[in-house]
Each structure stands twice: as structure tokens, then as C-alpha cells.
Image (cartoon, grey):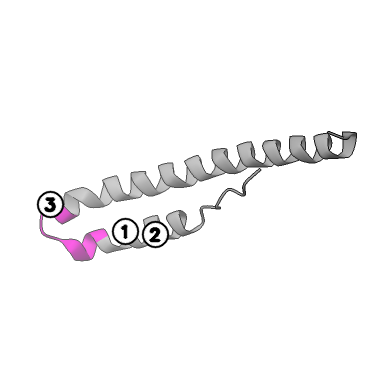
Amino acid sequence: MTVAELLRRRRAVAQNESTLRTNDALFDAARDLRRRAQPFLTDGRPELAQPYLDEAEVFESAVDLLPGL
């Protein structure tokens, strides 16, 4: 492995770790929003839950796919 390949690989690994942390934060936010919507759904008030569910979808759609190394 050349020095350039090693540096490219290290950058890719660092980027993947960063992407994983970001994805975790996005999923945590979406999970929290869905948790907040659940009492409204349980009480039969889906119209009150919908804003939380819509916002959760926004966070989930912002997740990046990880490229292969």
C-alpha cells in the first residue's frame, strides 16, 4: 500500500466514523419525535401526532448512506 493509498483510506475511515455519529444523532432525534407522537396516537388523536411524525421523517431522510471502503 502506497502512502497516498494509506492517507486516502485513513480519510475514508474518518469520514465514515463522522457519518456514523451524524446518522446516530439523526436517528435519535427521529426516535424522540416518534416517542412524543405516540401518546397522541394512543389517545386516538392522529392529527396531533402528525407534525411529530412528519418531522421525524425529515430527520430520517437526512441520513447519509455509508460508502464502502
Residue at position x 51%, y 57% in the image: 62
Magenta highlight: main SS: helix
| Residue at numbered disc 2 | 57
Residue at position x 81%, y 34% in the image: 6
Residue 48 is drawn in which quadrant?
Answer: bottom left
Which of the two labelled residues, at mark 3 and mark 2, occupies the earlier sequence position?
A: 3
| Residue at numbered disc 1 | 53
* Contact between labelled residues 2 and 1, with CB atoms less than 8 Å apart: yes
* Contact between labelled residues 2 and 3, with CB atoms less than 8 Å apart: no
Is 43 part of what is drawn in magenta?
Answer: yes
Q: Position of residue 31 (x, y in %)?
A: 35, 45
| Residue at numbered disc 3 | 42
Work out which residue is located at the far right of the displayed protein and give it.
Answer: 3
Distance between the alpha carbons at the discs numbered 1 and 3 = 14 Å
Residue range highlighted in magenta: 41-49
Q: Position of residue 51 (x, y in %)?
A: 32, 62
Which of the two labelled residues, at mark 1 and mark 3, occupies the earlier sequence position?
A: 3
Distance between the alpha carbons at the discs numbered 3 and 2 = 19 Å
Work out which residue is located at the far bottom of the displayed protein and give it.
Answer: 47
Q: Amino acid at mark 1?
A: Leu
Label 1: few (<14), some or many (≥20) within 10 Å?
some
